[in-house]
Image: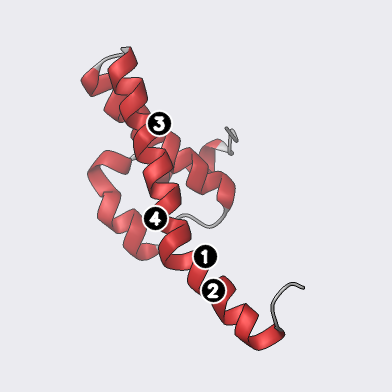
Amino acid sequence: MPYIKFEDRVDIADWDEHFEDIVKTGNIDNAGEMQFAIATLINSYMERKGLNYQNCNDVMGALAGAQMEFYRRTVAPYEDLKIKQNGDVQ
């Protein structure tokens, strides 16, 4: 996990209280900040739910599902567009 500068953590660290603001205003400017925000969200979830195998497995499943959904809805259509524009791999 990237350990971003403290001053960059301020807005992201208030994740629970300001989730919609963070997402809508685009306070996450790079992959490191995005990873920090996701880790902060997960840490908050685990603090509330408790550390056990089921909760860890639930988090890993949610992350895997989010990755697959991102690929399905964003990456695959983008790749299809680029195939049309530039031709398929031979």
Q: Earlier in the sequence, mark 3 or mark 2?
A: 3
Q: Is mark 2 on a helix, strand or loop?
A: helix
Q: How far apart are marks 4 and 1 (CA)?
A: 9 Å
Front-most of 87 and 49?
A: 87
Q: Which amino acid does label 4 sit on?
A: Glu
- Disc 4 crowd, CA 10 A, few/some/many (<14, 14-19, 20+): few
Q: Earlier in the sequence, mark 4 or mark 3?
A: 3
Q: Can residue 70 be seen in this view?
A: yes
- Disc 1 crowd, CA 10 A, few/some/many (<14, 14-19, 20+): few
On the image, numbered disc 4 is attached to which residue?
69
Q: Residue furthest top?
A: 52
Q: Which amino acid does label 3 sit on?
A: Met
On the image, numbered disc 2 is attached to which residue?
78
Q: Which amino acid does label 1 sit on?
A: Val
Q: Residue at x 42, y 41 (%)?
A: 64
Q: Which residue lies furthest to the right in this view?
A: 90
The answer to whether 72 is drawn above or below residue 64 in the figure is below
